[in-house]
Amino acid sequence: MPYSEIDLSKIKTYPASARVSTVTTALEGRPLRPGMRFSAFLEGLPAVLKADELKAVARAVVDARRLKKPILVMIGGHVIKTGCAPVLAGLAADGFITHLASNGAAAIHDTELARFGHTSEDVASQLEDGSFGMASDTALLVNDAARRAAAGREGFGEAVGAMLLEEDAPHVHRALIVCAHQLKIPYTLHVALGTDIVHQHPTASGAAIGEASLRDFRIFASTVSKLGGGGVVINIGSAVIMPEVFLKALAVARNLGHPVKDFTTANFDMIQHYRPGVNVVRRPVLAGGSGYAITGHHEIMIPLLAAAIYEYAEVGA
């Protein structure tokens, strides 16, 4: 053989029984059984990695409510499309969300579901003939809400919720944006011009949309300024808009002297993206706090998180 082999005969070894290890039998999950309580399910999860992190986020939310600190939940449009609005609305009604924020898509899907009971068009086929996004009734309400907010003292999201309630839309009480309005908690709407179907319409006013969305940014930044000492920020399904808005609001709050540290952040999404990872999970808590990234489908993870929150609230965790 032309190649040399290393001699393993003098390798130094040790007994595994004496080694410090990171995984033990105490961390293992427990067998499931029919009819078990959710508390037993939670306690039976393996005490490692994302199972532990999910429980940590749930406990942080419960602690934040006890401390009367903000619980800020930011969402993308897919959260609404996967049927999770009523779950989040329930958390808000019970004090486990104190501020909701979204990109324009989430509010549009919420609006269509409230008014018509359906949303989410067939983009591929409607793009081909140019009809994609051309629903006039959807655009008219959202664009009128922007004008109403810009002309008065309402926020953009607040105006959308108020208008849906005023017209008594058929499915209004399942709408997250309406729930926030009724609970008198902020639902701030953060729009990038040209990203939403309502911007394709002649009813769109860039000046009104910009003014209304900027007001909501200031409302959002006010909430961010109060996060220090136990608040919670959860981003669900927004890959770009909300992580960027949050980072800028945090900079504003700290620039004005607010001690925004020692709080919890979490990103829940089907795929972990760059901006939520750095702008939500890592950078904001470098001065103190904890950040978590949990991957999974919204229609599973949001109800699971909600159930854990209720369970820990009941037992006083």
Image (cartoon, rainbow, N blue to C red):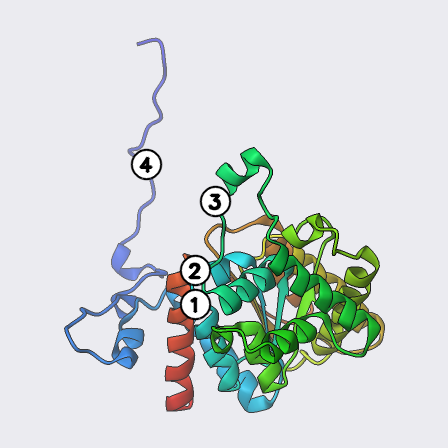
Pointer 2 residue: 82
At mark 1, the secondary structure is: helix
Mark 2 Cα within 10 Å, few/some/many (few <14, many 20+)?
Answer: few
User: Which quarter of the figure has residue 247?
Assistant: bottom right
Q: Which of the pair 112/37 is nearer the observer?
A: 112
- Within-10-Å neighbours for mark 3: few <14, some 14–19, many 20+: few
Marks 2 and 3 sit apart, C-alpha to C-alpha, by: 16 Å
The residues tagged by marks 4 and 3 sit, at their Cα atoms, a distance apart of 67 Å
Mark 1 and mark 2: Cα distance apart in space: 10 Å
Question: In this view of the protein, which residue sits in the foreground, 24 or 217?
Answer: 217
Q: Earlier in the sequence, mark 2 or mark 3?
A: 2
Amino acid type, residue under disc 1 in the picture: Ile
Q: Residues within 10 Å of mark 1 (few under 14, many from 20)?
A: many
Q: Quadrant of residue 259?
A: bottom right
- Marks 1 and 2 close (CB-CB < 8 Å): yes
Q: Residue furthest top?
A: 2
Instruction: Find residue 302 and name its label.
Output: 1
* Callout 2 amino acid: Thr
What's the residue type where badge 3 is placed? Answer: Asp
Above or below: residue 272 compared with residue 91: above
Closer to the N terminus: mark 1 or mark 2? 2
